[in-house]
Amino acid sequence: MKENSFDTPGVFKLLVLFGCLSFLFVRISGAILHPALYEAVPQLARYYTHNFVADTGASNAVSAVYLDYRVMDSLFEVGILLIAVTGILFIAGGTGRGTGRGLHE
């Protein structure tokens, strides 16, 4: 039986803490360093609601924003999610293929 050299729940807690702190840092620094961005949000919303049919040809505003305005953002989010899941499986000890064991031994 293989022994892990690190505490898996401890590593998971550390990753969750790091993720939460990173999220808070981005939100706080964005509000402090770029206040004009937060003031521009209502103008962007008005632009999208008035021009989405002419810009995209879609009859649904949600589909227009998601599939046309933000398609690259959505694809990169899928890639980041794939990398995160792969990293979690790697840290957790793999899938145990061929050994008859799963993530928990």
Image (cartoon, rainbow, N blue to C red):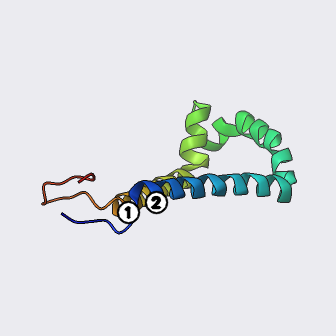
Question: Contact, CB < 8 Å: mark 2 with mark 1?
Answer: yes
- Tag 1: Cα neighbours inside 10 Å, few (<14), some, or many (≥20)? few
Query: Which numbered marker is on residue 91?
Result: 1
Q: Residue at x 70, y 52 (%)?
A: 24
User: Is residue 79 visible from the viewing direction of this image?
Assistant: no
From the image, tell me which residue sits under label 2. Answer: 11
Relative depth, front residue between 103 and 73: 103
User: Is residue 40 visible from the viewing direction of this image?
Assistant: yes
x, y percent for residue 12: 46, 55
Relative depth, front residue between 80 and 26: 26
Q: In the drawing, does residue 92 fall left or right of residue 49?
A: left
Query: Which numbered marker is on residue 67?
Result: none
Q: Residue at x 56, y 42 (%)?
A: 66
Q: Amino acid at mark 2?
A: Val
Q: Residue at x 39, y 58 (%)?
A: 8
Whether 27 is drawn above or below 49: the answer is below
Element under disc 2: helix
- The image quadrant that residue 105 belongs to is bottom left
Q: Residue furthest bottom?
A: 5
Q: Nearer the viewer, mark 2 or mark 1?
A: 2
Q: Amino acid at mark 1?
A: Ile
x, y percent for residue 55: 65, 43
Element under disc 1: helix
Q: In the drawing, does residue 10 fall left or right of residue 47?
A: left
Q: Residue at x 31, y 65 (%)?
A: 4
Whether 58 is drawn above or below 5: the answer is above
Relative depth, front residue between 45 and 53: 45
Q: In the drawing, does residue 97 fall left or right of residue 79?
A: left
